[in-house]
Image (cartoon, rainbow, N blue to C red):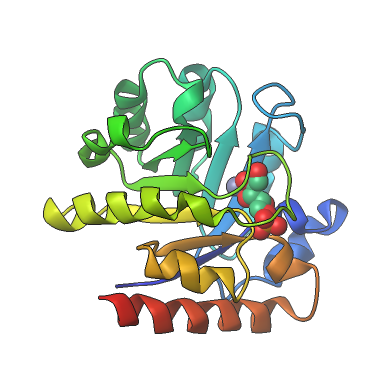
Amino acid sequence: MTVRINPSILSADFVNMQAELDRIATADLVHVDVMDNHFVPNLTFGPQMVQRIQDVSPIPLDVHLMIADADRWAPGYAELGAASVTFHAEAADDPVKLARRLREIGSRAGIALKPGTDVEPYLQLLPEFDQLLIMTVEPGFGGQSFMAEMMPKLRRAREIVERERLSVWLQVDGGITADTITVAADAGADTFVAGSSVYNSGDPTENIAALRAAAEAHTHAHR
Ligand code: DX5
Ligand code: ZN
């Protein structure tokens, strides 16, 4: 199984974004957290900033929309060229219709679940998606602690992905460190978002390599 490490620029220095993007060039995709101060109690950036990130990023964009009315706003992020656009199940009226629209525009389609949202009703929709994001913190802020109690959701999704032979990436976001990444990898995640553990101490390139090595050791162990 391929491991993907997607650093979150929520922990980057926003006024030096181009340099901050260059520091994570060895990662797979750059995780871009869009927050509207409505769906979550925090505000980051909108389409204009994401467009500029798209223009200068050395790696493809993994856009995580924490915004209300995803049906209306998500397609614009696919149109600006993001490789992947993930919206929250709690913020979409018609997730399948929206996923089809995102794929039609040419991006991968992802669906995200807050910690309190059950995974079961969404398992049957997985063929419509390229990625399922299981949140391991309440969305809104970086630097929170990993919620290991979300692992049963990942295990269940991994079971369905294997049984149905789907090519859906299973992403985990929130509190991922070189320690907790092994727990998420054991539970079946293959795509890992990390903000503070990549940017907040040491060298991002080394941090990315350490996260990758830890995840790879565990994805192989449980297969
Ligand atoms: C939280 C965001 C995360 C955040 C993760 O709402 O979706 O992507 O950047 O930050 P860490 O890795 O610090 O928990
Ligand atoms: Zn995120």
Furthest residue toward front = 149
Q: Nearer the viewer, residue 173 or 12?
A: 173
Residue 22 appears at what percent x and percent y? 69, 69
Q: Which of the pair 58/92 is nearer the observer? A: 92
If the image is split into quadrants, where does the C terminus sit?
bottom left
78 or 111, nearer to the observer: 111
* Count of marks placed on residues: 0
Q: Residue at x 57, y 68 (%)?
A: 180
x and y, in percent, of residue 123 in the image: 26, 38
* Quarter of the image with the N terminus in it: bottom left
Residue 92 is left or right of residue 108, and the answer is right
Q: Is residue 11 above or below residue 218?
A: above
190 over 219 or under it: above or below: above
| Residue 54 seen in this snapshot | no
Give the image quarter of residue 218: bottom left
Position of residue 184 measured from the top left corner of the image (x, y, whole percent)? 46, 64
Residue 153 visible somewhere in the drawing: yes
Counting from the top left corner in percent of width and height, residue 67 is at 61, 27
Task: Indicate whether 75 appears above or below 114.
Answer: above
Residue located at (32% from left, 47% from top): 130
Please identify the residue farthest to the left as the structure is shown: 164
- Residue at 50 percent across and 84 percent down: it is 213
Q: Residue furthest right?
A: 15
